Image: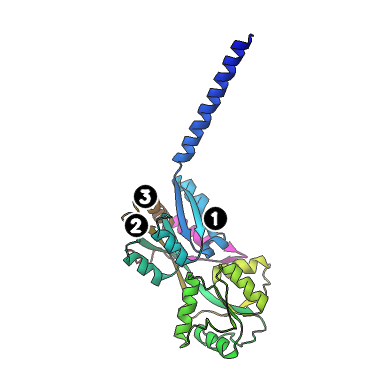
């Protein structure tokens, strides 16, 4: 074979490879990708890693998410940086929707908050309600570690201080503010021998990390103030014209299906249920 013919054939092969590569790029660009902002608890627990493949299988949509505090998640929605939210601070969600940033809010699941601390319980809060527990912690000036990040958990903590009739002790030396996510905050509390408020799902994840024998244990739980409701909200296309509202709607419709709700109920660590589906209850949709 002469050099000219060989060069011609190599050029044809090269062009064929280039075409295949270009088609592949085109398919990748055409892939439906839904961007979500969510809380650290849905990420730290592994819930979204568990649900995302099911969502992709059922709808063909790839779910990608950023995990942060609810306050920052709502800001990402306000700034049109994501398409959908999965958050857990009803008061902040109300304001978000009233301002025209979000639509179609739908309840998805719930768990509860708990106050955790060292097993020897230096402040003596074991068995107390959340408000009485915080009163005791303040009275004893025991170390309390706050996320202090405007997350749903931080909002709940501030609410309980107020319900306890106390000012938020953010100037006190015993009140430690991390500005970090839940697992980091729990670990800081453990290092300092202090207390913190956490959602139960993340606590179970923390407990599993220590094979059921963690440094911090649940000391206050079960009162009505500790309810922790999660809802999904589509970013309002009227505020964000480029948002993928159609994909957000598909996610909302999917996550309330019996299949997805059962998957949430089945998600466990150490045999313990982390989240409880409740999409069949009043959604508070707007």
Residue in the image at 38% along x and 51% along y: 243
Residues at circles 1 and 2 in contact by the CB criterion of under 8 Å: no
- Magenta-colored stretch includes residue 261: yes
- Residue 180 is drawn in which quadrant? bottom right
Question: Which residue was labeled with disc 2?
Answer: 236
Q: Nearer the viewer, mark 3 or mark 2?
A: 3
User: Residue 74: x, y in percent?
Assistant: 42, 63
- Mark 1 nearby-residue class (10 Å; few <14, some 14–19, many ≥20): some
Residue in the image at 53% along x and 64% along y: 40
Q: Nearer the viewer, mark 1 or mark 3?
A: 3
- Magenta-colored stretch includes residue 283: no
Question: Which residue was labeled with disc 1?
Answer: 50
Asked whether residue 191 appears in the rendered view, the answer is yes
User: Residue 155: x, y in percent?
Assistant: 46, 74
Question: Which residue was labeled with disc 3?
Answer: 242
Q: Residue furthest top?
A: 2
């Amino acid at each position: 074979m002469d050099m000219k013919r060989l060069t011609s054939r190599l050029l044809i092969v090269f062009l064929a490879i280039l075409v295949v590569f270009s088609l592949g790029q085109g398919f990748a660009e055409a892939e439906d990708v839904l961007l979500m902002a969510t809380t650290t608890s849905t990420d730290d627990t592994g819930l979204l890693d568990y649900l995302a493949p099911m969502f992709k299988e059922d709808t063909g949509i790839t779910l990608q998410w950023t995990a942060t505090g609810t306050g920052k998640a709502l800001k990402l929605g306000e700034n049109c940086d994501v398409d959908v939210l999965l958050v857990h601070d009803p008061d902040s969600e109300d304001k978000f929707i009233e301002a025209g940033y979000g639509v179609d809010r739908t309840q998805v699941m719930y768990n509860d908050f708990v106050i955790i601390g060292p097993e020897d319980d230096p402040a003596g809060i074991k068995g107390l309600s959340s408000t009485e527990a915080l009163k005791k912690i303040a009275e004893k000036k025991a170390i309390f570690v706050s996320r202090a990040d405007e997350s749903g958990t931080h909002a709940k903590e501030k609410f309980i201080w107020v319900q306890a009739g106390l000012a938020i002790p953010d100037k006190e030396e015993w009140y430690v503010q991390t500005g970090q996510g839940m697992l980091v905050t729990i670990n800081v509390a453990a290092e300092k021998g202090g207390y913190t408020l956490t959602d139960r799902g993340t606590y179970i994840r923390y407990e599993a990390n220590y094979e059921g024998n963690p440094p911090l244990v649940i000391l206050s739980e079960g009162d009505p103030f500790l309810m922790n409701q999660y809802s999904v909200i589509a970013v309002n296309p009227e505020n964000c014209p480029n948002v993928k509202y159609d994909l957000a709607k598909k996610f909302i419709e999917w996550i309330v299906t019996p299949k997805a709700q059962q998957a949430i109920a089945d998600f466990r660590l150490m045999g313990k249920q982390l989240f409880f589906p409740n999409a069949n209850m009043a959604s508070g949709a707007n």
